[in-house]
Image: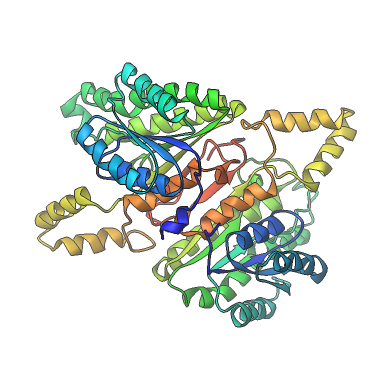
């Protein structure tokens, strides 16, 4: 399958935020296989270093830059490092996010939502603004926002997360309008359930609650998808690759739902 | 370029616009292509071009409103190219371009006969062959007409909207066979239709053609009218495994003119 990505980002420099063991890692590896050098931002240096080694093993350059996107100076440093060490920024994937603490607004108060917005909206916009300046110097670029099915299907106790991602989606459309004339495209990917350790943990919890096996829970939830399957973050990264690459050069301001047919937009 | 290496695609509506660009893009990515349109002359030209460049192409003149011709086209594809992995429904008939009050509804039916029922006939004929493979992809081509209502466009807009909805229903029905169904929704597409519109506006409003074109471009954030080649790239994406877990979705390729 790796030949799929062949050459789609040849010679490009991609900045990926929120790089840990999940989606961020897959974005970095898929983009590296597509020919990009990658700049990895996240708070934990040990996780960044691990992914950077994997990227380098693929023969691409990788920079690990510990970054808290809620810190404007850290965002500037991430982008400056990319420009100084690799020569610029062509692609930014905003993958960093704060999870909802699973509490209602009545119990948690507005402060809980504010904390989520601090990362998902304000931090993301801060990093985006830094990257846009660098992209302008390159004469264009592509920004991909990792959104969520929660913006489409409302779930209890996920209000802050959903609202922050909806706000980001709307902001992304404004950015697409504003940045189109300088050749910077802005699109979003809205993934549904993603198979991995945290969903596995959640299914085990549900299974105990329901008195069934985790496999029963999987079949129930995967069965709500047309394709009867829950895909991985690597599968989502491949769709993000299309928006990152020039293949989508006529597309901006759009959102693609990658959810195995769970929900149609 | 290998996004579609080893696959076979059947592409309807192979005329000088999106259909031809799609055929070329699929061949570039390694797909063998069966090309469908009503008349053979242009099909042969495109097929010859692809074959000369080292690809595999089959010209299959077909009236998609005729079920037996649809079946024959699919049968020929499978017998000559070995299988069918992807169907691209880009065949369409332009609308009557009359307002509802002036409309001859029998002419409107003809729009639906091709755009909805023709596409669905070809799709139904293709499903058994698509089912034979581990995965399959069906791509429909929508239109900005269904996103942005204009006067005197109801038959065309409604036909594409109906097809969009049908695609989502098919995504539900065919998901358990791992057949994905998605729609690319183009905005303006550079070519003869833009030229016609520009000439018409230019003469009816007595403004320079360049001015009319600049008006269109000024409404597009990316500042230019997308080309058929660029629409074809979105179709390639839905045909490829890059979108392996995407089904029932629409993707607007319009330079950001409107955002869905």
Type of colouring: rainbow
Instruction: Quadrant for residue A78, please give it.
Output: top left
Instruction: Quadrant for residue A171, please give it.
Output: top left
Above or below residue A68? Residue B65 is: below
Q: Where is residue B81 shown, x and y percent of the image?
A: 61, 77
Q: Nearer the viewer, residue B241 or B96?
A: B241
Q: Residue at image x 17%, y 27%?
A: A108
**Number of numbered discs overlaid on the protein picture:** 0
Q: Where is residue A158 shown, x and y percent of the image?
A: 26, 37
Instruction: Quadrant for residue B13, please give it.
Output: bottom right
Q: Nearer the viewer, residue B172 or A175?
A: A175
Q: Where is residue A252 shown, x and y percent of the image?
A: 55, 37
Horizontal placement of A33 versus B25: left or right? left
Above or below residue A216? Residue A137 is: above
Q: Please say whether residue A34 is visible from this viewpoint.
A: yes
Above or below residue B153? Residue A99 is: above
Q: Please say whether residue A153 is visible from this viewpoint.
A: no
Q: Nearer the viewer, residue B80 or A227?
A: B80
Q: Residue at image x 50%, y 61%?
A: B181
Q: Where is residue A262 shown, x and y percent of the image?
A: 37, 54
Q: Nearer the viewer, residue A83 or B141?
A: A83
Q: Residue at image x 54%, y 27%?
A: A138
Above or below residue A208? Residue A82 is: above
Q: Pick the quarter of the image with the N terminus of chain B.
A: bottom right
Horizontal placement of B71 versus A216: left or right? right
Q: Residue at image x 56%, y 24%?
A: A178
């Amino acid at each position: 399958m790796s030949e799929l990505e062949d050459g789609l980002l040849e010679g490009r420099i991609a900045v990926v935020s929120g790089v840990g063991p999940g989606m961020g890692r897959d974005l970095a590896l898929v983009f590296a296989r597509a020919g990009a050098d990658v700049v990895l931002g996240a708070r934990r240096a040990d996780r960044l270093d691990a992914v950077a080694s994997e990227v380098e093993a693929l023969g691409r350059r990788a920079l690990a830059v510990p970054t808290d996107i809620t810190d404007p100076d850290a965002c500037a440093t991430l982008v400056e490092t990319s420009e100084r060490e690799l020569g610029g920024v062509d692609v930014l994937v905003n993958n960093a996010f704060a999870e909802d603490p699973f509490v209602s607004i009545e119990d948690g108060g507005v402060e809980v939502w504010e904390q989520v917005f601090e990362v998902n909206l304000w931090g993301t916009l801060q990093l985006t603004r830094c990257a846009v300046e660098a992209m302008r110097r390159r004469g264009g670029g592509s920004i991909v926002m990792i959104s969520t099915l929660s913006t489409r299907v409302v779930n209890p106790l996920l209000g802050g997360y959903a609202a922050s991602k909806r706000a980001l989606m709307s902001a992304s459309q404004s950015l697409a309008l504003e940045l189109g004339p300088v050749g910077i495209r802005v699109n979003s990917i809205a993934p549904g359930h993603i198979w991995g350790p945290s969903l596995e943990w959640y299914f085990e919890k549900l299974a105990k609650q329901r008195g069934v096996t985790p496999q029963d829970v999987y079949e129930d939830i995967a069965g709500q998808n047309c394709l009867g399957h829950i895909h991985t973050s690597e599968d989502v990264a491949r769709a993000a690759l299309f928006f990152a690459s020039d293949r989508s050069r006529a597309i901006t301001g759009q959102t693609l739902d990658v959810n195995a047919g769970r929900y149609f937009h | 370029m290998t996004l579609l290496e080893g696959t076979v695609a059947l592409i309807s509506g192979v005329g000088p616009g999106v259909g031809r660009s799609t055929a070329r893009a699929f061949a570039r990515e390694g797909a063998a292509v069966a090309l469908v349109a009503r008349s053979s002359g242009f099909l042969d030209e495109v097929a010859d071009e692809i074959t000369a460049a080292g690809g595999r192409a089959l010209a299959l003149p077909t009236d998609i409103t005729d079920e037996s011709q649809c079946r024959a086209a699919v049968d020929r594809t499978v017998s000559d190219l070995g299988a069918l992995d992807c169907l691209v429904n880009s065949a369409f008939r332009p609308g009557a371009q009359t307002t509802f009050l002036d409309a001859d509804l029998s002419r409107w039916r003809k729009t639906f006969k091709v755009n909805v029922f023709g596409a669905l006939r070809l799709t139904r004929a293709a499903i058994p062959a698509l089912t034979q493979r581990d995965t399959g992809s069906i791509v429909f081509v929508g239109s900005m007409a269904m996103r942005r209502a204009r006067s005197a466009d109801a038959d065309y807009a409604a036909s594409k909207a109906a097809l969009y909805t049908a695609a989502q229903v098919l995504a539900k029905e065919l998901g358990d066979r791992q057949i994905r169904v998605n729609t690319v929704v183009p905005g303006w597409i550079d070519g003869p239709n833009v030229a016609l519109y520009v000439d018409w506006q230019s003469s009816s409003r007595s403004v320079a053609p360049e001015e009319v074109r600049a008006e269109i471009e000024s409404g597009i954030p990316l500042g230019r009218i997308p080309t058929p080649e660029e629409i074809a790239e979105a179709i390639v994406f839905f045909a490829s495994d890059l979108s392996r877990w995407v089904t029932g979705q629409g993707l607007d390729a319009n330079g950001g003119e409107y955002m869905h």
